[in-house]
Amino acid sequence: MWVESVRVAKNWMESRLKGEDGYSKYMDGEKTFIDEEKIFKTLKENRDPKPARIRSIIDEAIESKECLSLEDCAALLNVKNEELWKEIFQAAGEVKKQVYDNRIVTFAPLYCSNYCVNNCLYCAFRRENSVEIRRRLTLDEIRREVEVLAGMGHKRLITSYGEHPLSDVNYIADTLRAIYSVKVKGGRGEIRRVNVNAAPMTVEELEILRDVGIGTFQVFQETYHRKTYSEVHPPDTIKGNYFWRLYCMHRALEAGVDDVGIGVLLGLFDWRFEVLSLLSHSIELEEKFGVGPHTISFPRLRPAANTPFVQNSAYKVSDEDFMKFIAVVRIAVPYTGMILTAREPEHIRRRVLPLGITQTDFGSKIGIGSYRESYNKQEAKIQQFLLGDTRELDEGIRWLAEMGYIVSFCTAGYRCGRTGVKIMKLLKTGREKIFCKLNAILTFKEYLEDFASEETKRVGEELLEKELKEVKDLVSERTYEKLIEYLSRIEDGERDLYF
């Protein structure tokens, strides 16, 4: 049976590698939008920038909400003066506040399968990792996992899958349907939006996910540096095809999946190069489709079972450089959402939240089936890496509220059509933050009513009073009265009210 499954996986992989390339039509001959020579040259030519230039770049970014040029971004990355970095950090927080206000979206990851045909050196799911316990959740198991997550109060998930015929697009679509079908606590516990972190797909496959109701389609390039990419992704694998992965978001946007998420795995190559590459990717998508990345992610390498590459990486990113990376990306791509995950421990999350983070997770478990089951000593052998912060959702919400952040469970934009080009315009003009604030208040109120502990409810109600005072000065009297009406209706038992 095992030999047969290996044969099937190998045939499936070979068939995908032999298919239509899926990227040539987006390229200018052999030229790609990641111009390594230009990136290195730009970093070199913008060394030792004058403070006046840096302050001018910051002011323009705050004012325009448009992507920086590669030259201006390189200048920020080359700052050496620590006092000037403090100004950059402050500016990053100001950009986030102007675009998204003080709200933080929460979500939970749901790992559905760890079978994988790839052999990435840094990943515990790689096919040659003999200590990994392989498993794919059935749809009934998916529903049981979601019952736990919805019972915590989560409204938004990101599902994750290894690249394998057992977790192809049809399986992914079935898992999304299963997730959306779950209702607990009299219907008050439900998942309203599912984002997907999966392998690159064809346009036709992505159309299937579009029709099921995917949220954001998320694929990380891992590293944009070609030589490093080849070294960590063996050529006899699907993931070894750099261009197939690089142009996956072009195919997604062509398929009508208009919220896409890009990212890098920090620790594979020089983080400054990766910043300029992420910016290049953002500019490319805006120019070709009018839509930049809905989110940018930037996980750092974490320990994983039987994965020595992680410990031996020559490009590990320090905490200080991690802060600089986040701040520069926030200023360079002002409109994008920025995802900080529970890979990072509490003290790092506290330090970097003010630099422009918009999304984070709590109550996360990343083993296959770990929300419903307890694996104890086997845990490391069923997950991709080790988490740095394992606090439950309620504690995380209270922690954020005590720092002045309101947690949002809002998914209204998807129902109202505020996605793709529409949301890009709203974000760049600062209008989206009004919707963000109103809907954050409503969904936060839902959580406090349905799921919060007494202590979290007390802290949360205090924050809601502050939020209501602020929003009264931001919206019309009619809108404010409607907000108060909605809050009253939520107290009376209605749910999923939004602007």
Image (cartoon, rainbow, N blue to C red):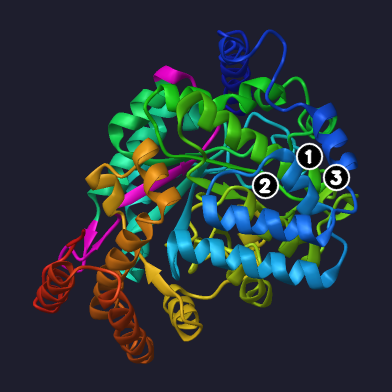
Query: Percent from the top left, x then y, of residue 243?
Result: 67, 21
Would you name the residue on which mark 2 appears?
132
* Residue 230 vertical placement versus 217 (above, below): above
Q: Earlier in the sequence, mark 1 or mark 3?
A: 3
Q: Nearer the viewer, mark 2 or mark 3?
A: 3
Query: Would residue 373 be seen by someone viewing this image from the given angle?
Result: no
Residue 121: mark in rendering: 1
* Residue 495 vertical placement versus 399 (above, below): above
At x 28% / y 64%, what residue is drawn? 439
Q: Which residues are magenta?
A: 183-204
Identify residue type, mark 2: Glu
Report if residue 423 lies within the magenta region. no
Picture quadrant of residue 432:
bottom left
Q: Earlier in the sequence, mark 2 or mark 1?
A: 1
Identify residue type, mark 3: Asn
Q: Nearer the viewer, mark 2 or mark 1?
A: 1
Q: Earlier in the sequence, mark 2 or mark 3?
A: 3
Query: Percent from the top left, x then y, of residue 217?
Result: 46, 38
Query: Dots 2 and 3: beta carbons under 8 Å?
Result: no
Give the position of the N terminus as an image quadrant: top right
Query: Would residue 223 be seen by someone viewing this image from the given angle?
Result: yes
Residue 463: mark in rendering: none
Query: Percent from the top left, x then y, of residue 247?
Result: 59, 24
Residue 46: mark in rendering: 3
How far apart are the two marked residues, 2 and 1, measured between alpha carbons? 14 Å
**365 vs 22, nearest the viewer:** 22
Question: Which element is circle 1 on?
Answer: loop
Query: Dots 1 and 3: beta carbons under 8 Å?
Result: no
